[in-house]
Structures are given as structure tokens and as C-alpha cells.
Amino acid sequence: MRYQGYTGKYLEVDLTTGRIETRPVEDKLAETYLGANGFGTRLLWERVGPEVDPLSPENIIVFATGPLNGTLMPNSGRMEVITKSPLTGIYGDSNAGGFLGPELKFAGVDFVVFSGRAAAPVYLRIEDGRAELRDARHLWGKDTFETEELIQKELRDPGIKVACIGPAGENLVRYACIQATMSRSFGRVGGGAVMGSKNLKALAVRGFGPVRIADPEKFYEVATRSHFGIRGNDIYPAVSRYGTPGIVSIMNGIGRFPTKNFQLGGYDQADKINAEALREQYFVKDVACYGCPVACDKIYRVDEGPYAGTEVRSFEYETLGGYGASILNPRLDSIIKAGDLCDRLGLDVISVSRAISFAMELYDRGILKKEAFDGLNPVWGNIEDALELTRRIAYKQGIGALLSQGVRRAAAEIGHGADHYAMEVKGQEIASQDGRAQQSMGLAHVTSSRGADHLKGFPTIDETGYPTEARRRYGEQYLPDMADPRSTKFKGFLIKDGEDYAAVVDAVGTCKSGGNFVLAQLYWDDVAGAVRYATGMELDADGLKVIGERIVNLQRAYNALHGISRKDDRLPKRLLTEPNYQSTKEGSVCRLEEMLPEYYNLRGWDAENGLPTVARLRQLALDDVVERLGPKLKP
Ligand code: SF4
């Protein structure tokens, strides 16, 4: 390969035959898709058609890095897993930090593609470019923490980086995640279930090679400038001190903290589960992903009470929202327990907690009867039974089997109007991000390529009003509306730009929280400079924008292959019709239709079918997409 920053090699692993091939990464692939999610999107498009069941051997699952992983750029430890999602049936990707991404690069591999299904459980060991499939029968049934420890012991290397599934993945829970190096999760789209369907228990990686840089001097300049910029950012101290739990009070204050399964936008006991309470009672120490100056990650430990001895890492805002406000539970120690349980079982904390709050609401409304819960009493606030439901979901026991399919499928099976309480978009459960209190968030949920998601468009500029960032990034002409969470004006523009930029941030292997969105410090020029000097590619901010757009458009095209169109870009009725009175006195709903036309227009997508036009696809050099989607497209 002519570019630096990449290793130039990838592994093709056929689990059915056990064959492992090392193949070259083509220059053209790097030039057009950059890395990580870009590579994965292209591979899915080429290899996994609409006829493929996500849990069949024909699906693929790709572990992919980007050109900045393992370099001196700040927070360059994030990588992607890409697969066709068993939860949504469409495009799926998942991003996790930690150390796995850099380690894969050090081991001389840019990405790994798994296909087929092993006859018995296996795990893949990669060490400095050599790879082998190893027996994992003794690991099947173990939780994710046990699995990592056992592999490290077996290979006599405590430094080996492991990504693995727990019981939820083995049991094909549709939102099972992949736990990476204990503290990080590839969550959301059900990648853990895809691994389970392939009898693939884990990936274990060790490497000692270098990541070569095309222009070390200039790259060093960009990297150090970025580090200092992040550390000098106004909100760096707060993000570094509290991590994502730091937004609990802020979100609650603006009525954007979904409570009681989105019946309310604020929780009257939020002060018991906010970052200050967490830090005061349970904080142990800060931890950081590879090369990160922010260290938003923390270790928390419970020393007393029924959950004494529980310790969690990467404990996030979403766990506090999902197992706290969403089920009306103010006990912080029990939420820590829930976070630990989800990590060990390998469950996506957003989807599983949303499934539980959905079940609680159905029970409250008499749609689900007591008998359905096999002795449990799923009333609001009953955390003990919520924890037990979590276990039953992972093992698909009783009602756990129903809820393990995600709220959309569960609602369809339950009937009696249950779908009204299923808070999902395209089959993906909505995170603790209320689009009634922040209009752009509602739009982000419907346009995201993986179903309801706050991290694709990642609107932070208008969350609580960041006029300085809005001015710096976009100019004065968009203010004050751009920074007003309740305004719908310019939000199509904000989300389109956010999605394109996020696609690139993911593709290069850096963190959205660590400098690009939550700390909106770095932007197109910074990333373009880093990629240019790391790889030697002739690339500026405009070139990078085209790649971001190409990735987003190909993901939309992939979803279009699966029947997705304008009709699927919708929010649950509750967010459109039931006002959130914690956000505004008069009550606010999400005014989606005021934003969508602007978004489609800026994307160059047809406003009627919501799909890229032929002209737009050709501009992005996606001619093969035009051929394949054919009659679905407008000129
Ligand atoms: S900001 Fe947080 S999640 Fe991002 S790389 Fe740093 S420690 Fe990891």
C-alpha cells in the first residue's frame, strides 16, 4: 500500500472452513472510504444483500480501525464493528474506545472480516500479523469479564486485548453487545448476537509493531496542537472530572432527561443520581482510553449495602438514564449494579433498560398482566425486579425471551396498542435523549443509518446553547436559532454536517466525545491535517467532507436496498403528540416535519422518497449504487 497510517493488510476469516487469509488493503478503498466504518459500509454493500438473515452464516462482521488509530492524535483509540443488525435488519455499526483498535494496528492488521459459522465455539487470536482460530468451548457460558481473564491466563499474557461476548450474545439477544477490554462496549446494533450466531466467542489481539507516519514532523505539530486545544477548551475541566454523567443535571434542567419511559422529560429525584452524587459516594479513579487527554472514563465502587463489592468502569449517562429516571429508580448503588450486570452479560444498556421501562409501562396500563412476569412485580422503581428481568433477558427466560427481541418486535407480538409505548426508530431503542426538548435530537434519531441514535448527527451545539462553537464553526448568520434547542431552524443543516463529520471521525479512529462533538474543539481542518500528514494522502477539508457524505449516502443506499425510505423516517407518536412539560411550560413536542425537508434538500435526497437522487450519487462517485438501486431512485 502506498499510504502510511495503515498497515496495508486485513484478515479474511471464514469460520465455516476455518481458513484465514491475509489480504492487501487496496489504495482505492482507503482513498474513497478512509477506514473503519467507511470500509465496513463498503464491504456490507458488496457482500451482504437484503436476502441475508443477520444471524445466518452469510452475514459478515467486521472489526475495523482507521488511519489515526494508535497514533499521537488525541483519543485515537476508538474502532468500529460493522455488521447487518439483527435488531433492525439494516446497516449496523458500533464504536468503542479503549485499546483494542491501536493493538490491532500494532499487530499489523487494519481490519478483520468474519464470515460463516464455526462448527463449535472458537476465538481468534492475532499476534503480530499471525492469526489462528482456537477452541473456545471452555469459554462458552462464561461472562465477558471471566472470558477476558481466562484468555489472558491461557495465553499467559495479561496485556492481550480481548473483545468478547457474554451469555446475551451466545443466546442471540438481538441487542447483545461486544465487550472490549472489560471497560468498553461495542453497543447498540446487536453485534454480540452476530458473533454468537457464528460461534465466535472472542477476538484476542497482541501486537508490538509501529504505526508509520508519512510526515512525522507536521503530524506531531497537528497532534500536539490538538492536545493543547482540547485541554484548553472551556468545558474540558467538567468533562474530564465527571464524564458523561456530568450531563444528568444539565439535561434534567432543560427537560431533556427522559423519565418513566418518556412520559416525562425530567426526574424529580435526579439530584440523587447525578454526577456530583456519583463522585462523592463511589468515585475510585480516572481512567482513559488510548492517547486520551480527557479521561472521561472512571472507576466507581460500591462499598456498602446490598451491592457492596460492585465496581464499574465506563459508567455512563445512559445507564443513569435507563436504570434511573426511565424506571423511576433513585438508588445510585443499584444503577451501578445494573451497569456491571449489563457489562458482564454483554447487553446494550440503552436497549435493555428501554425494554424494561416499556414492560413496566405495559404492566402499569394493564396491557401485560402479572402472570406474564413469572413472579416478578414490575412496578415503577422496583430495581430488584428490573435486575432480575435483565438476567432473564440475557438468558431468554420467560418474558425475557420476548423482550430480548427489542421493543418493536415485542410490541408487535403483544398487540393491544403496545406499539404506542415502544420508544424506537427503525427497531432501535431511543437513548435518554428527548427530541421534544432538543428539536435537532428528534431529527438525528430518524436520519441515523442505524435506527434511533444520538451519536450519528450528535447535535451538541444546541443541546444547551453553545453560541461560541456555533459561531466558530458556522458563522454569525445561523445565530441565535442554531444554538437554541427549541428552534427547528437550521437543524437540518446542523444534523447533516454532524453526520458527515461523525462519519469521518469514526472512520479515522478517534473519539467523538474527546474533542470533536462534546468538546467541540477539533473540526474538519484539524482532522484533514492529521490524516494528510499521517497517511500522505492529498486531502483537505473539502475532500474529507466528500468522503463523509459518501459514507452516509452509501449507508442510506444500503438501507434502501432493505426497503427503507421516507416512510421509515418517523418518531414514536408519543414524541410527536404528547407534550413534554418539563421542557417548556406550554409543553413541547418534536416538530420533525419542520426539519426534515431542509435535511433532505441539503443532502440532495428526494423529498418524497427520502433517497439519494441519481445526480447526488454520481457526484459522490457511487455509480454502482445507481445501477443497483435502479428504479427506486429519482433523477
Ligand atoms: S473522551 Fe472518554 S471515551 Fe473518548 S477517548 Fe477519551 S476516555 Fe475514551
Image (tube, rainbow, N blue to C red):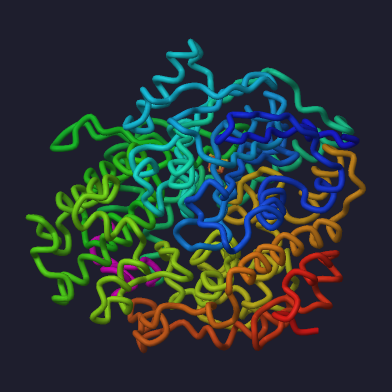
Camera-side residue: 121 or 335? Answer: 121
The answer to whether any part of residue 572 appears in the image is yes
Above or below for 137 versus 511: above
Q: Position of residue 353 (x, y in %)?
A: 31, 57
| Magenta-drawn stretch contains 115 | no
Say which quarter of the image contains residue 300: top left
Above or below for 267 versus 175: below
Camera-side residue: 156 or 524? Answer: 156
151 left or right of 218 in image: left
Q: Main secondary structure of the magenta part?
A: loop
Q: Residue at x 48, y 16 (%)?
A: 158
Above or below for 216 versus 337: above
Q: Position of residue 43 (x, y in %)?
A: 69, 51
Residue span colored magenta: 255-271
Above or below for 394 versus 502: above
534 left or right of 10 in image: right
Camera-side residue: 43 or 334? Answer: 43
- On-image quarter of the N terminus: top right
Q: Residue at x 82, y 53 (%)?
A: 32
The answer to whether any part of residue 521 appears in the image is no
Q: Position of residue 335 (x, y in %)?
A: 27, 48
Q: Position of residue 366 (x, y in %)?
A: 13, 76
| Magenta-drawn stretch contains 267 | yes
390 left or right of 84 in image: left
For ligand 1, which image quadrant applies? top right
535 left or right of 283 in image: right
- On-image quarter of the C terminus: bottom right
